[in-house]
Image (cartoon, rainbow, N blue to C red):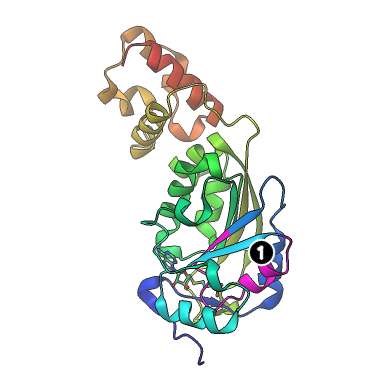
């Protein structure tokens, strides 16, 4: 069977460097799970290294042409190819309730949505590893004070320890993307239950970063907080100056304020 022709609307950029595929596969620690789900396997450049590991590999792929390619080339995968859209599919239908890791050279057009869905499913996902466009990988891993520190950084790091691993050049893809890529890994924190309301934390973080150049005193006006709370010195800060732990503390104070 011929190679799959890259389709732009599916974010298809096929990796053609075997050593990078191997390095991405090797970024899995294999700690605390027996299954891995690869999102967007395409023609399987990364999949074949996963199949070498002592772990059960599942793949989910939206493109039926790629699915046909995988079915003919990777007989070992056969019943573990899920021909679906990761964002819409209830993955427990295939993976049950057991923990699994997520890996991929992800479709960049939906990268933040993939991370948000992972955060929703975090009880089942102890580890998440793979390649994004460099800016997104950097954003997820950035700390307070960085220009790219934002909603995704705070929410991912509330539950996961994150690590930027390495940068990948455009020319190792067919067709080459316009941007560089970055490989990162998230390992779920041992105690990842938040000591505050998750929903309120998401609201606070999103509201603050939607006006990232303002102090919290201005950006959080819509939350109708009491004057005494708004006198707290944290309200003098802009969101990029506030650590994940401080956002959690702030959420606790806001909850106690009666919002
Ligand atoms: N991992 C392969 C392909 C990367 S391109 C490689 O490294 O060569 C991204 C892949 O994600 C494509 O195969 C594309 O079809 C697939 N994809 C795009 N949107 C998807 C979705 N919503 N769910 C599952 N797969 C998706």
Residue 32, image x, y percentages = 69, 45
Q: Is residue 222 above or below residue 23?
A: above
Please state if 259 lies on the left or on the right of 195 as rendered. left
Q: Magenta segment, which residues?
A: 37-54
Who is closer to the viewer here, 250 or 7?
7
Residue 126, image x, y percentages = 61, 44
Q: Residues within 10 Å of mark 1 (few under 14, many from 20)?
A: many
Q: Residue at x 45, y 75 (%)?
A: 12
Q: Say which quarter of the image contains residue 108.
A: bottom left
Residue 198, image x, y percentages = 43, 29
Who is closer to the viewer here, 96 or 16?
96
Q: Residue at x 32, y 9 (%)?
A: 227
Describe the element under mark 1 as helix, strand or loop: helix
- In this orientation, does residue 159 appear? yes
Q: Residue at x 53, y 65 (%)?
A: 59
Q: Is residue 246 above or below residue 202?
A: above
- Name the residue tied to disc 1: 24
């Amino acid at each position: 069977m011929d190679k799959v022709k890259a389709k732009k609307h599916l974010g298809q950029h096929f990796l053609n460097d075997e050593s990078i595929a191997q390095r991405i596969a090797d970024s899995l620690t294999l700690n605390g799970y027996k299954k891995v789900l690869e999102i967007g396997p395409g023609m399987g450049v990364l999949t074949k290294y996963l199949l070498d590991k002592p772990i059960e590999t599942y793949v989910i792929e939206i493109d039926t042409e790629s699915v046909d390619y995988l079915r003919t080339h990777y007989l070992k995968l056969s019943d573990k190819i899920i021909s679906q859209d990761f964002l819409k599919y209830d993955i427990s239908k295939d993976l049950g309730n057991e923990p699994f890791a997520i890996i991929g050279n992800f479709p960049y057009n939906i990268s933040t949505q993939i991370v948000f869905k992972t955060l929703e499913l975090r009880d089942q996902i102890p580890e998440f590893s793979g390649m994004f466009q460099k800016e997104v990988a950097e954003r997820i891993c950035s700390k307070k004070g960085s220009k790219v520190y934002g909603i995704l950084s705070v929410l991912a790091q509330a539950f996961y320890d994150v690590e930027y691993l390495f940068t990948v050049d455009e020319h190792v893809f067919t067709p080459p993307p316009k941007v560089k890529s970055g490989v990162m890994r998230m390992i779920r924190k041992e105690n990842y239950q938040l000591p505050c309301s998750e929903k309120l934390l998401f609201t606070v973080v999103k509201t603050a970063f939607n006006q990232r150049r303002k102090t919290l005193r201005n950006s959080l006006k819509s939350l109708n907080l009491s004057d005494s709370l708004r006198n707290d010195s944290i309200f003098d800060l802009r969101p990029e100056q506030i650590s994940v732990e401080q956002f959690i503390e702030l959420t606790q104070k806001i909850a106690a304020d009666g919002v």
